């Protein structure tokens, strides 16, 4: 089953950039389809593969920050080529 996941990592401290950069860099290296914009990162692929990688990478990202939030939305389909119709 294909899924699309939107992620927003929000460390709750001043020096937040290194944790975000490492999180995104590791997702890019995972072999998954990864798209980014200024507000979030989208990951696309097979459910089991995406969730296995995200479980590991989220845990590693949380180890780098003292306090933080991760917002995640999951859609059951591969939406990487979505274009609005308006």
Image (cartoon, rainbow, N blue to C red):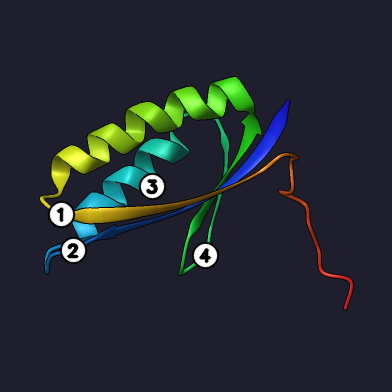
Task: Look at the numbered disc 3 and give the secondary structure of its residue.
Answer: helix
Are the two marked residues, 4 and 2, in contact with CB atoms closer than 8 angstroms? no
* Front-lying residue, 52 or 33: 52
Q: Position of residue 72 (x, y in %)?
A: 48, 50
Dot label at residue 24: 3
Residue 38's place in the image compared with 5, above or below, is below
Residue 67 lies, in percent from the top left, at 15, 54
Q: Which is nearer the eye, 55 or 20? A: 55
Which callout, 1 or 4, points to the residue nearer the camera?
1
Residue at the outermost right position: 85
| Disc 1/disc 2 C-alpha distance (Å) | 5 Å
Question: x%, y% of residue 54?
Answer: 43, 33
Do labels 1 and 4 touch, CB within 8 Å? Answer: no
Q: Nearer the viewer, residue 4 or 31?
A: 4
Q: Are marks 1 and 2 in contact (CB under 8 Å)?
A: yes
Q: Tell whether label 3 touches label 1 (CB within 8 Å).
A: no
Residue 12 - label:
2
Question: Of helix, strand and loop, which one carries label 1?
Answer: loop
- Looking at marks 3 and 2 on the same chain, the residue that comes earlier in the sequence is marked by 2
Q: In the figure, is residue 51 to the left or right of 11?
A: right
Q: CA distance from mark 1 to mark 4?
A: 23 Å
Please name the residue that numbered disc 4 is placed on.
37
Please say if the residues under marks 3 and 2 sit with CB atoms less than 8 Å apart.
Answer: no
């Amino acid at each position: 089953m294909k899924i699309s996941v939107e992620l927003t990592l929000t460390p709750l401290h001043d020096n937040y950039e290194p944790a975000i950069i490492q999180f995104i860099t590791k997702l890019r290296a995972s072999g998954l389809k990864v798209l980014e914009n200024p507000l979030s990162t989208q990951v696309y692929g097979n459910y089991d593969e995406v969730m296995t990688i995200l479980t590991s990478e989220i845990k590693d990202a949380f180890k780098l920050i003292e306090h933080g939030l991760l917002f995640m939305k999951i859609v059951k389909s591969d939406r990487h080529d979505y274009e609005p119709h308006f």
